[in-house]
């Protein structure tokens, strides 16, 4: 195909305006060169066959994900450790805050820790569970402070399903609470001209739990078994026809397709560096959620842990 030869020549010629760019730029360059109309799909097909393009295509981070519905209080907690070492000298050596929040009611619990050892973290959780009762599930990041023998024993003791978020995205509910708590703490610091928080921390948490929360449209302390249905409606509303129609969107991959996986990037990773893995995988299953997710297997036929959104894959 003559157009394909032109595409290859222009794409790999550093001095040409259409070189090493994206679909639009190469499409325009080929049409200008040949004087003919060229299909955009043909340009996309050519680029998808070139490693220099697919490996460095920008990986999308922000896109719609499967919505997780939590149906009642004590169904799922999220927890995190806030690093407060910069203020340890003013706070009797306390260097971390364990923050725990009920995803449904938004009720929060905080414990100050001197170290983030397994023993201290387990002790802090036992204290939280005495105050709150135990949840069915607990979501944390994959840090060692949450994944160790002692913590596993604690989870088994209370019959809690513990899991980590298998992506670069954090547990957003507890992250949002952390920001709220820290904002209140730093305002207190400014008002009192101090950096000491250990005595006032319980009051700040109590204040948060007694403050109207916009997502549940009430105070976290007011969420009860009796008003669960109202809270659920305030949180999630009622699925609309538009929500349901998302299932009919065109799916980008099918079983048997060979794909690369987006590399997980930190906030400061350079966007021009390689965005997708060198290793290729095969789509083994298309799971009909909203949006669709995919299971993969490697060259040896081993199924890869977790599932992947279309935006995390690249042909």
Image: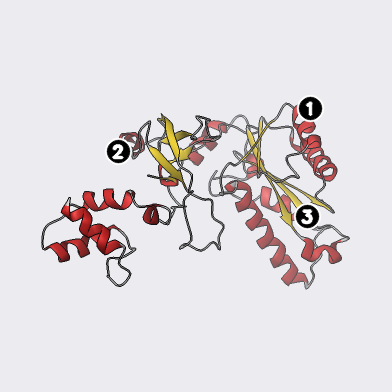
Residue occupying image coordinates x 37% and y 36%: 257
Work out whether residue 25 can be spotted. no
**Residue 38 appearing in the image:** yes
Q: Establish if 33 lies above or below 151.
A: below
Report how far apart the C-alphas of labels 2 and 1 lie in the structure.
Answer: 46 Å
Q: Identify which residue, 311 or 26, lies in the foreground.
A: 26
Q: Position of residue 15 (x, y in %)?
A: 30, 72
Q: Mark 1 points at which residue?
A: 157
**Secondary structure type for disc 2:** loop
Residue 163 located left or right of residue 278: right
Label 3 element class: strand
> In terms of image quadrants, where is residue 129?
top right
Foreground residue, 171 or 315?
315
Q: Is residue 43 above or below residue 149?
A: below
Which comes before the other along the chain, label 2 or label 3?
3
Mark 3 vs mark 1, CA separation in Å: 25 Å
Residue 95 image-quadrant placement: bottom right
Question: How many callouts does the rendering have?
Answer: 3
Q: Is mark 1 on a helix, strand or loop?
A: helix
Query: Which label lies toward us, 2 or 3?
Result: 2
Q: How is the image coloured?
A: secondary structure
The residue carrying mark 3 is 96
Which residue appears at 62% of the width and 45% of the height? 219
Q: Which of marks 2 and 1 is nearer the N terminus?
A: 1
Q: In this view, does 5 lie to the left or right of 72?
A: left
Density class for disc 3 (Cα within 10 Å; few <14, some 14-19, many ≥20) is many
- Residue position marked by numbered label 2 in the rendering: 250
Seen in the picture, residue 270 relative to 239 is either above or below; the reply is below
Give the spatial CA distance, label 2 vs label 3.
Answer: 46 Å
């Amino acid at each position: 195909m003559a157009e394909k030869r032109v595409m290859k020549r222009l794409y790999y010629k550093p001095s040409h305006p259409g070189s090493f760019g994206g679909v639009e730029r190469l499409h325009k360059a080929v049409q200008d060169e040949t004087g003919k109309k060229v299909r955009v799909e043909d340009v996309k097909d050519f680029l998808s066959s070139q490693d220099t393009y697919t490996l460095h295509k920008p990986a999308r981070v922000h896109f719609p994900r499967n919505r997780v519905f939590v149906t009642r209080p004590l169904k799922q907690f999220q927890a995190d450790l806030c690093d407060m070492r910069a203020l340890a000298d003013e706070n009797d050596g306390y260097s971390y805050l364990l923050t725990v929040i009920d995803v449904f009611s938004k009720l929060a619990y905080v414990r100050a820790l001197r170290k983030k050892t397994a023993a201290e973290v387990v002790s802090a959780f036992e204290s939280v569970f005495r105050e709150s009762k135990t949840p069915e599930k607990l979501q944390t990041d994959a840090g060692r402070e949450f994944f160790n023998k002692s913590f596993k024993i604690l989870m088994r003791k209370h019959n809690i399903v513990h899991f980590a978020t298998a992506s670069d995205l954090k547990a957003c509910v507890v992250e949002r609470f952390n920001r709220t708590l820290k904002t209140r703490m730093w305002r207190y610091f400014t008002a009192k001209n101090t950096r000491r928080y250990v005595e006032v921390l319980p009051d700040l948490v109590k204040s948060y739990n007694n403050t109207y929360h916009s997502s549940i449209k009430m105070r976290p302390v007011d969420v009860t078994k009796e008003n669960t249905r109202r809270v659920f409606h305030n949180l999630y509303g009622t699925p609309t026809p538009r929500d349901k129609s998302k299932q009919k969107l065109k799916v980008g991959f099918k079983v048997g397709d060979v794909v690369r996986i987006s590399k997980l990037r930190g906030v400061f990773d350079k966007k021009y560096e390689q965005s997708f893995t060198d290793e290729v995988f095969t789509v083994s299953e298309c799971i009909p959620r909203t949006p669709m997710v995919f299971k993969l297997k490697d060259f040896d036929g081993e199924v890869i842990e977790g599932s992947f959104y279309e935006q995390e894959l690249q042909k």
